Amino acid sequence: MTYNPSNNLEFDFSNIEIEKIETPKPILKWAGGKTQLLSVLEEARPKRFNKYIEPFFGGGALFYSLQPSNAVIADSNEELINLYRVVSSEVEALIERLKLMPNDKDFFLSTRKLDIAKLSPVERAARTIYLNKTCFNGLYRVNKQGKFNVPFGNYKNPKICNESRLRSASKVLKNANIINGDYKRVLRDYAEPGDFVFLDPPYLPISEYSDFKRYTKEQFYEEDHRELADEVKRLHELGCYVLLTNSNHPLVHELYGDFDISVHQTKRNISSKGNKRNGEDVLVKVEPKKNIVVVPDKVQLSSQVEKYPSTRFMGSKGNLLRHIWGVASQFEFNSVADIFSGSGIVSYMFKAQGKEVFSNDYMAFSSTFTKALVENNQTVLTDIDLNKLFNAETKLDDFVSETFKGIYFSDEDNAFIDQLRMAIPLLKNKNKQALAMSSLIRACMKRRPRGIFTYTGLDRYNDGRRDLQLTLKEHFLEAVKLYNNAVFDNGKQNKSRHGDAMTSRRKADIVYIDPPYYSPYSDNEYVRRYHFVEGLAKDWKGVEIQGNTKTKKFKSYPTPFNSRNGAHDAFDKLFKKHKDSVLIVSYSSNSLPTKSEMLEILSKYKQNVDVVSVNHKYSFGNQREKVGKNKNDVEEYLFVGY
């Protein structure tokens, strides 16, 4: 029929019954049901997982709340498993059967004594629900012969058949593999890395009234709880997420002391005396142990990483990026704090991988790098900016030309540095200032044969390479192109900080720590190597040049990483400060504290500690060792605490 408004048709919907779709909830009242703890469990559960496994299923409150698309649910109670299988596959037949069952004591008693072996699955399932809804306190208990022995409840109007709840439960149960069996067999057969296992075993009794655990004819004794704890440890090693609930019993704390334990107030709905229904539940949270193995060739990094302007920065982790990301990518995280950012390449890599990045370094020129390319998402230097830098009419103080005459650069190059020192502040945009200063710093480092300022002379180590033939201005212009090309927006609010890592309060999901290494084989004085560009980044404000030295260096900054004891205490403080984050620490085999000492410190604050070893050769010699000698071939460690 074609609709015509002029027909004035009226429709009567009064006789049409529209069924309300109910959120899935437990279909039984169950001893130890977890409805009260749902908010706690939801908060503690992993946000992502492969399969959901619950081998002490009972009422299944968490299962219905999560509605997992792939689940294994199990119980040793045959009647429970039969019920859930019927609800999954024959829910309409079950509903019709339940509609015929009255709330009557004689009917209850006759139903209770039925021989279940002679009943069909649907009849057995209807019996299970009926007894649960009409018996005393909804308790399910059997004697040693497996016979249901709970008395009639004398309730006025129990809801024996909740059709909408049964149908909504049926939809969720269709996504589950429903198994009748022992929890150990289920976990051995089905648990795999990345699965979420929820364990709600019969509780350890706190008082003489606590024997409601006996919902099958088999008992669950102390030794069973110890075996369960061993299984939890196996699941942890396997790589599963585990949540376990139990009573607040001393044995629970003893068995699970290595994991995160919290205590929660609950009410015991099954107790016959209302004034004794208050209790305490323990939640044990077990994170999966990461079997951290990194195969660098298989690690995928964004092509953006390759755009980062390289420098021969001492200790730069440019060659270890795939190892670092290979470790970090095994965790779920959104934010990273790189608290000793150095060359800035690790911060930039994390930014390129789509993470929110906080970069920090106590060296001003290092934080300038990350201001330009980590915090800055869009700004670039234009031709107008360059024209202002080169042609600005500003009074020059000739500080570099006079202080460093004949030491590192030609008079022409020194004059160029003085010109840019005075002109860069004229770029009012802080990101543009950082880009210009970063380009100038890179130009100075590229113009020096080894990129450092520990020796004097204009032609020393001049082997004819291109970098040594270009003027500083030519280097600067090349650097500007590289930095402009490396600017990108990852959609995050990234931040660069110039400051002491020991005082940083920034929180992040992962904290990456690459401190100065204290080693008997070399010094870690970054100021001695880079004092010129560090002074340039600060315009030599707040430093005192040692005029009696050939290099015109200034005093090194105070650091706890210049002695073994100082480094030990600093690591302890850093690990404690960031104990709530995943910690990834770059370290060297020739550094102190030793590997075993580092593991001991980290283990004070992190439950799990792993070590990834990487063969690595440093690009610099030092005062005692030349490049190429064995002591420059070291094993680089990535300590991982979580």
Image (spheres, rainbow, N blue to C red):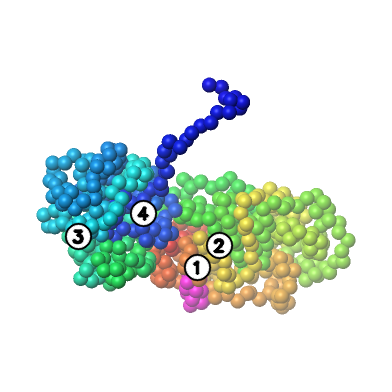
Quadrant of the rendered structure where residue 537 is? bottom right
Residue 401: percent from left, percent from top: 80, 67
Q: Is residue 200 above or below residue 263?
A: above
CA gap, disc 3 and disc 4: 21 Å
Q: Earlier in the sequence, mark 3 or mark 4?
A: 4
CA gap, disc 4 and disc 2: 35 Å
Q: Residue at x 42, y 43 (%)?
A: 20
Q: Is residue 96 left or right of residue 362?
A: left
Residue 515 seen: yes
Residue 253: percent from left, percent from top: 30, 70
Residue 292: percent from left, percent from top: 41, 55
Q: Residue at x 83, y 56 (%)?
A: 388
- Give the label on residue 62, or none: 4
- Give the label on residue 578, or none: 1
Circles 3 and 4: CB atoms closer than 8 Å: no
In front here: 609 or 377?
A: 377
- Give the label on residue 214, or none: 3
